[in-house]
Image: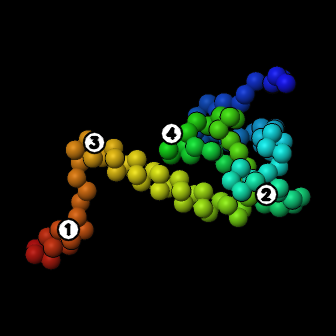
Amino acid sequence: MSRTVPEWIADNDDQDVPQRVRVRVFDDHDGRCHRCGRKIGAGERWTLEHVKALINGGQNRESNLAITCDWCLPEKNAEDMEDKSKVYAIRSKHLGMKPKSRWSNSFRKSRT
């Protein structure tokens, strides 16, 4: 079956997802959490989530959106932050930046 409406793409990363798109994404996923596959019941809390987080290079567009139940949300957010930290560490190393040692900073402060 072909798509009848064009995909929603945000103008920028801060743009909120319109209600009509939220409903479409919920229906496209048959009301199931994209992580655990559990059917989300009526009145149950859920979050519209970027599959690849914006902080990790994901795009703010309909094809990168899925629904996540409140049970899976903390785990998803923790994984996104872990990915962000890894990318930052690799990028910093690539650019020749060395991480600052906490010990050396505290040593310098105590010596002055």
* Residue that label 3 marks: 94
At mark 1, the secondary structure is: helix
Left or right of 99 on screen, residue 67: right
Q: Earlier in the sequence, mark 1 or mark 3?
A: 3
Res. 5 visible in picture: yes
Res. 47 visible in picture: no
Q: Which mark is residue 57?
A: 4
Q: CA distance from mark 2 to mark 4?
A: 27 Å
Image coords of residue 28 (percent x, y): 80, 39
* Residue under the image location 42 percent in, 54 percent down: 85
* Residue under the image location 87 percent in, 59 percent down: 41
Task: Tell me the kind of residue under disc 4.
Answer: Gly
Image coords of residue 81 (percent x, y): 49, 56
* Residue that label 2 marks: 38
Q: Which mark is residue 105?
A: 1
Callout in the foreground (1, 3): 3
Q: CA distance from mark 1 to mark 2?
A: 48 Å
CB within 8 Å, label 1 to label 3: no
At mark 3, the secondary structure is: helix
At mark 2, the secondary structure is: loop
Looking at the picture, tell me which residue is in the foreground, 22 or 12: 22
Image coords of residue 88 (percent x, y): 38, 48
Q: CA distance from mark 4 to mark 1?
A: 32 Å
Looking at the picture, tell me which residue is in the foreground, 25 or 35: 35
Q: CA distance from mark 1 to mark 3?
A: 23 Å
Q: Earlier in the sequence, mark 3 or mark 2?
A: 2
Q: CA distance from mark 3 to mark 2?
A: 41 Å
